[in-house]
Every structure is written in structure tokens, then in C-alpha cells.
Image (tube, rainbow, N blue to C red):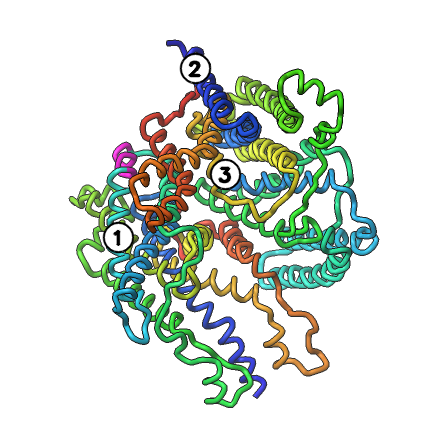
């Protein structure tokens, strides 16, 4: 059996699983799985760029995904009336002051001769800068958060179409990745991993706490959509007629139509990203990346700028994750900083890449779709199994209740088992690198 | 008087919590650093190993409580701790036999082992949540305070109270005992010496006839004991919640790296450095400054440098500074 046949078969298998979901559960559930699967596939491509192409061990994916989500809010939400006048300038002034402090500290470190005076000057700049920063920031933040805190209490966004937020999300993530990459990329693998894990936790902490930016745990809801609202479709006589012609009631038809619209948009983005990633892989640049990955010393001896190339691919991969994050927040229609968890947004994406086959973009797409399907469907499957096991038990027994309650946690267990099995028996993944 | 009040406030809100948290982190970091020294990879499942050991301890504690067994003023969990350690030892030996050994035989790259430990992390996370649930569990009993704030105030007549929780006292005493035992084992016993030899130079150790599988087994056993003790102490002091234990991974690794990965003494120092920085930077200093400054200069704000939710930022910032300026850690660990 040729590789192409095998790979097509694997994708057909995922398609079949989705179709079964459609027939057994509902088509709404099936399309939802496909939509999130497409987003997951894009995230997996981003990680594959970093790990599969370049061997960079980044476990801060969650942070970049969240940054993308933040971009959606900043781009597409309407600006809060009065917030800019109340404290917008203050907040931005404070942020500039903060940046100036860091830049000043770096300059002091570069310009002054090492010694006690440099340490003193450095500390003076950093500590003084911090207190000035807080002195400017705090009243401005207070003013912004006072404006109708139940509904807004934050600066709001630019009110642009939400689709603009997707590339902007990528840019934001790229900017953050540049900052991180400049400081942390020189470290060896395990240290880089811990560093990125830490940064992602900090990004989430910022989103949760800085209410003027994201409303924190109060969540930003009602983010504009790129597709029509169900209620508008149901009130549109033309749409109702078409739906009736297909034998569907208007409510189901409208929900399907909206989800399908998202699916088409996501598919377009996925195809663009996949095409770009494939072109990059086949180009001299891609070959160079893999050469650096396989033997850094040799590549360096050949005159390749290893740190520079690492920074490049780190930024690119993070930007892809940022785009996916913006898309996900758009699909959810809300930004909920409290819902970002490393197991779901970092380590699950890693499972996708490992299972799909690191170094192969199609593998990442397959892994993304397949693992997302499992992630969603393990829970009903576990419930079904629990149902079978407990069929003979007495009604109201404690063990039975516990099993039913715990079935939800089977998904973590399953992901771990799948990952370990693949690592052991197919260490190169389902679609190995060529 | 004001100066004494300030001193007591600092002890109460910074010194005591810092020492207790630092001891817990130090024990956790010791486990992570031992794995790194002997098995040569960063074990991402370490937080969940702690959670697993603690879970077993909690289950045994509950059983003891229902059977009416107790330690009087001390928490019952101390009696249950040996069972927790045994359970955790069985678990880590099982994972080593069926997961890690395969890659060790293959001489897989460390980064592969890190990824494998991510898989183990998922499984342990699932198992713990499956058995005990994802919610907070309290299992501390016995006397709550060694000295309560009110008793202290009555004793000294100061305005500020100093409360020492029983769990804080137990944490410090246990940590000291465990560390003494560990260093005695590493420095005085044959097995401990062979472990250190293996960590320093694998090839030489093999040449002198040290059995690597034995060394690895003892390492896992010690790590399981350390992780369970650390986890149980943390759970007694605060509460047990599987997700929190997973999140402890970051400060624990920060502590181990700051002290120098693979260096046990460094891990202990790192634990306290991280704990004290977290507590100091997220503490609202108003109370202390109120006593020290003349009335006219009294601060109006809380004088809290960062909100408590940024405690990860603190561990991380220290980690990054150390990595950038002294990549092998303060007490020079392994560089490779």
C-alpha cells in the first residue's frame, strides 16, 4: 500500500468518524467538531513549525492562543464611550513609561562599566521606574474601570470587522514571541520549555487581572461575528423557504448554516496556512531548518545563523497559533480568560502533533482533527461504558454515582494513553516525516 | 513598641508562610532535581506524582478518621503518610517499568523522555481526578494552631498577633528531618554514594560495576517519598486540589533551576528563594509601613507591589534572570 493511499485512508477515517457523529448524535455536534478540529489543526501546524521543523520545545502555546483571543477583543469590540477620555491616555502613558524603564535599564547595563555603580544605577532605574509606572497606571485604570463596570469597565476595541482580528492576532502573537525569543531562545531544550510554560501562565494572569484591557474574569461577551445571526436567518422568509425545501425546520437550518459558514472560513485559513507551511518545508529555507535541527554544530560551522533562524521560526509558529486563537475566540463569541488551561491548550496540541507525526504538516492536520474528535467524544463513550458496567448495580449506590461523575475525566486519561502508545509503537507518528 | 509590632507583622505574614511554603517547594524541587541528576530529564509529571501520593494519603486519612484512629492534636494525615508513600512508590515503579525503561534502554534523547513524561502527566492527572474528583479536599484535623493570634497578643500585649499554624510547624520539622535523612543516605550509604557517582559520571560509574537499574529504582523510590511528603504537607497547609498541584510544577522547576538542576543543596536554597520572593512581592506592605513610618508619611495605598495572581510572574522572573546571567544556577548544577 502506497503512502498516499494510507494517508488518504487516514483522512477518510476521520471523515467517517465525523459522519457517524452526524448520523448518531446530531449534525450540529458534527459540524462543531469539524470547526474546532480545523482550528486545532492550525494550532498543530504552528507547533509543528517550531518542533517538527526546528526542534524548538515550546510549551507556551496557551499564551499565544490567548493573545490571539485578546486581539479579537481589541479589534472588533466597539470602544467604550468615555473610557479613552477617562483613562486611556494614562494607561498608554504608563505602558510607555514601563517600556522606557526597561529600555533605560538595558542601556545602563550596556553603557556603564561593570561594577558596584552599575548595579546601583540599574536598581535605581528599575525601582524608580516601577513606582512611577504604578503611580501613573493605577489612577487611570481606576478611572477606566469605574465606567459602567457591570457592562463595560474596560477600554473596548476599535470596532473593526472581526475578520481583521485574525491576522492582527497573528501579529500580536508574533510580537510577544519576538520578545520571548530574544531572551529565552539561547537556552537549552528543558529550560526553554519551562520558560515558555511560565510565560504562558503570566499572559493568562495578565488577561485575568487587567480588567481595563479584557474585563478580566468578568469576560467580554458578544464579540461581533463574521457570519449572520441565527435569529436574523429565521426571520428571513427566503431562508425559511429554502430550508423547508430541504426538509429542515428553520431553527436547525439556521444553526447549521451559521456553523457551516464558520467551517468554510476556517477551512480557507487552514488551506492557506497549510500551503504556506508546505512551501516553506520544501524550500531551501525548510531544508536548512531541518539541517539545523538535526545537527546544530554542523549547521553553525557551515555559516548558518542558528539563533537567528530559531528566532524566525519561533515567531512564525507562534503567529500561526495566535491566528488560531483569534479564530477560536471568534467562534466562541466571547473571551473568557478563566477558561484557558495548559492541559487543554498547550499539552493537547502537543498530543496532536506527536500523534499526527512531527515534521509533517499533513500529519499535524490529521492529528488535530483526530485528537479533537477523541477529546470531544471520549466523554460520551466513557458514559456509555459506565452505563454498561453499572447496569447490574443497585440504583443509588455510591460507586455508581461516583463512576458517572468521574466519566468526564476519562478524556485526560485517554489522551495520555494515546500519546504513550503512539510514542512507543509509532514514534514518528501516523504520517511520518519524509 | 511600633518597631516590635512591625517585626511581628512581618513574621506573621511573610516569615512563617514563606518558611512553610519554601520547605514544601524545596522538597518538591529535590525530587525534580534528583530525577534530572540520575535519569537526566525534566519530569513534567512531578506535580502530578505529588498529587497522586497526596491522594493516597488523603484516602487512607479518611478511612482512619472513619475508623476512629487519630493522633490527638496532630493531623491524622501524618499516620496515613507512610501508606501514601508506599502507594506512590508502587505507582512510580510501575510507570518506570512500563513506560520509561523502554526509552532508557534505547538511549533516547532527553527531550523524548520529557515528552513521554507529558504523557504520564496526562494519565496521572486523569487518574487522580477520576478517583478523588477535581475539587478542593480538606483533610487536616487535630489542633489548628500552636499559638493563635489572640493568645500571642495576650501573652505579649502587642497590637499585632503572631499565629503559628500546626501545619506550618509540622511542615518545617518534617522537612528538616527528611532533608537530614536524604543527605545522610546520599553521603553515607553505599547506595547513596553509587547514586551520586552515577549522577556525576555515568560511564565511570558503570565501569566500576554499579548497576544502573538499581540506581534508577532507588531514585524513583526516594522521589516518590519526597513527592508524597511535599504534596501532603502542602495539602495540609492549604488544601488539596489536583489542578493546583499541576500548577506547582512551575515554582518547583524554578526552584530546581535557580539552585542548579541536579544539585540537591541548590534545590533547597532555590525553594526558599522562590517562596520568599513570591510572598514578599505579593504582600500588601501597608500594615508594616504603618508602624515604621511617621504618621504624616503613612501610605494611602496597600503598597502591594503585584497582585497575588502574579505569583507565577515572580518565580518566572527570578528563573529568567538566573538563566540569563548564571545559566548553571546559583549553585552550579549540570550544564549539558
Q: Residue at x 62, y 24 (%)?
A: A260
Q: Which residue is mark 2?
A: A9
Q: Secondary structure at mark 1?
A: helix
Q: Is B111 left or right of A62, judged from the image as shown?
A: left
Above or below residue A193? Residue A55 is: above
Residue extent of the magenta highlight? B99-106
Numbered disc 3: secondary structure = loop
- Chain of the residue under the numbered disc 3 shown in the image: A
What residue is pinned by disc 3?
A58
Residue A301, position as x, y percentages in the image: 48, 28
- Place of residue B182 in the rendered image (x, y in percent of width and height, measured from the top left): 27, 61
In this orientation, which residue lies closer to the viewer: B196 or B85? B85
Looking at the rendering, in which quadrant would you find the N terminus of chain A? top left
Q: Residues within 10 Å of mark 3 (few under 14, many from 20)?
A: many
Label pair 3/1, CB-CB below 8 angstroms: no
Image-quadrant location for residue A157: top right
- Residue for badge 1: B87
Amino acid at each position: 500500500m502506497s503512502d498516499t493511499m494510507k494517508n488518504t485512508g487516514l483522512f477518510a477515517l476521520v471523515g467517517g468518524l465525523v459522519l457517524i457523529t452526524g448520523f448518531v448524535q446530531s449534525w450540529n455536534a458534527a459540524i462543531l467538531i469539524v470547526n474546532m478540529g480545523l482550528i486545532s489543526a492550525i494550532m498543530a501546524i504552528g507547533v509543528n513549525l517550531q518542533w517538527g521543523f526546528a526542534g524548538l520545545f515550546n510549551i507556551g502555546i496557551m499564551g499565544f492562543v490567548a493573545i490571539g483571543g485578546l486581539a479579537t477583543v481589541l479589534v472588533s469590540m466597539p470602544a467604550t464611550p468615555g473610557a479613552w477620555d477617562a483613562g486611556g491616555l494614562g494607561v498608554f502613558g504608563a505602558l510607555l513609561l514601563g517600556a522606557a524603564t526597561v529600555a533605560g535599564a538595558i542601556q545602563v547595563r550596556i553603557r556603564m562599566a561593570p561594577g558596584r555603580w552599575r548595579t546601583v544605577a540599574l536598581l535605581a532605574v528599575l525601582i524608580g521606574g516601577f513606582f512611577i509606572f504604578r503611580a501613573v497606571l493605577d489612577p487611570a485604570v481606576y478611572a477606566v474601570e469605574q465606567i459602567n463596570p457591570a457592562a463595560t469597565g474596560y477600554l473596548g476595541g476599535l470596532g473593526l470587522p472581526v475578520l481583521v482580528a485574525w491576522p492582527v492576532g497573528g501579529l500580536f502573537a508574533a510580537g510577544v514571541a519576538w520578545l520571548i525569543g530574544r531572551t529565552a531562545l539561547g537556552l537549552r531544550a528543558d529550560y526553554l520549555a519551562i520558560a515558555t510554560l511560565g510565560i504562558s501562565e503570566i499572559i493568562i494572569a495578565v488577561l485575568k487581572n487587567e480588567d481595563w484591557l479584557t474585563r478580566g474574569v468578568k469576560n467580554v461577551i458578544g464579540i461581533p461575528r463574521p457570519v449572520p445571526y441565527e435569529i436574523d436567518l429565521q426571520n428571513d422568509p427566503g431562508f425559511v423557504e429554502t430550508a423547508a425545501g430541504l426538509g429542515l425546520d428553520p431553527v436547525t437550518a439556521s444553526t447549521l448554516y451559521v456553523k457551516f459558514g464558520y467551517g468554510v472560513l476556517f477551512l480557507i485559513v487552514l488551506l492557506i496556512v497549510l500551503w504556506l507551511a508546505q512551501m516553506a518545508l520544501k524550500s531551501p529555507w525548510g531544508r536548512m531548518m531541518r539541517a539545523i535541527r538535526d545537527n546544530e554544530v554542523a549547521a553553525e560551522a557551515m555559516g548558518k545563523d542558528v539563533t537567528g533562524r530559531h528566532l524566525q521560526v519561533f515567531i512564525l509558529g507562534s503567529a500561526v497559533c495566535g491566528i488560531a486563537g483569534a479564530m477560536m475566540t471568534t467562534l466562541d463569541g466571547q473571551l473568557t480568560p478563566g477558561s484557558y488551561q495548559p492541559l487543554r491548550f498547550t499539552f493537547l496540541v502537543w498530543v496532536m502533533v506527536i500523534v499526527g507525526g512531527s515534521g509533517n504538516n499533513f500529519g499535524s492536520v490529521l492529528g488535530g482533527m483526530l485528537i479533537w474528535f477523541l477529546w470531544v467524544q471520549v466523554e460520551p463513550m466513557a458514559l456509555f461504558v459506565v452505563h454498561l458496567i453499572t447496569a447490574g448495580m443497585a440504583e443509588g449506590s455510591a460507586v455508581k454515582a461516583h463512576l458517572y461523575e468521574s466519566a468526564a475525566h476519562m478524556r485526560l486519561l485517554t489522551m495520555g494513553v494515546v500519546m504513550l502508545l503512539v510514542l512507543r509503537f509509532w514514534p514518528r507518528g501516523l504520517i511520518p516525516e519524509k | 513598641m511600633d518597631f516590635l509590632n512591625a517585626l511581628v507583622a512581618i513574621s506573621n505574614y511573610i516569615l512563617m508562610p514563606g518558611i512553610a511554603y519554601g520547605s514544601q517547594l524545596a522538597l518538591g524541587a529535590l525530587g525534580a532535581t534528583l530525577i534530572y541528576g540520575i535519569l537526566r530529564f525534566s519530569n513534567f509529571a512531578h506535580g502530578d506524582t505529588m498529587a497522586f501520593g497526596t491522594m493516597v494519603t488523603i484516602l487512607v486519612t479518611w478511612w482512619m478518621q472513619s475508623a476512629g484512629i487519630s493522633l490527638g492534636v496532630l493531623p491524622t494525615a501524618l499516620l496515613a503518610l507512610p501508606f501514601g508513600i508506599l502507594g506512590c512508590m508502587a505507582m512510580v515503579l510501575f510507570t518506570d517499568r512500563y513506560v520509561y525503561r523502554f526509552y532508557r534502554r534505547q538511549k533516547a534523547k532527553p527531550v523524548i523522555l520529557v515528552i513521554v513524561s507529558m504523557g504520564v502527566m496526562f494519565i496521572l492527572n486523569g487518574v487522580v481526578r477520576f478517583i478523588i474528583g477535581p475539587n478542593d479536599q480538606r483533610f487536616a484535623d487535630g489542633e489548628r494552631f500552636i499559638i493563635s493570634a489572640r493568645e500571642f497578643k495576650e501573652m505579649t500585649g502587642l497590637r499585632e498577633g503572631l499565629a503559628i499554624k500546626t501545619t506550618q510547624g509540622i511542615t518545617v520539622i518534617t522537612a528538616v528531618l527528611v532533608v537530614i535523612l536524604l543527605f545522610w543516605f546520599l553521603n553515607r550509604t553505599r547506595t547513596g554514594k553509587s547514586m551520586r557517582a552515577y549522577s556525576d559520571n555515568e560511564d565511570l560509574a558503570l565501569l566500576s560495576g554499579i548497576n544502573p537499574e538499581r540506581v534508577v529504582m532507588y531514585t524513583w523510590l526516594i522521589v516518590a517519598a519526597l513527592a508524597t511528603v511535599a504534596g501532603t504537607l502542602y495539602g495540609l497547609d492549604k488544601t488539596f486540589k489536583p489542578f493546583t498541584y499541576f500548577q506547582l510544577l512551575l515554582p518547583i522547576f524554578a526552584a530546581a533551576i535557580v539552585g542548579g538542576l541536579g544539585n540537591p543543596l541548590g534545590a533547597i536554597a532555590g525553594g526558599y528563594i522562590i517562596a520568599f520572593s513570591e510572598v514578599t512581592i505579593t504582600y500588601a506592605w501597608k500594615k508594616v509601613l504603618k508602624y515604621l513610618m511617621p504618621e504624616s508619611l503613612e501610605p494611602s495605598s496597600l503598597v502591594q507591589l503585584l497582585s497575588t495572581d502574579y505569583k507565577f510572574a515572580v518565580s518566572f522572573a527570578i528563573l529568567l534572570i538566573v538563566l540569563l546571567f548564571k545559566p548553571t544556577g546559583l549553585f552550579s548544577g549540570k550544564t549539558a
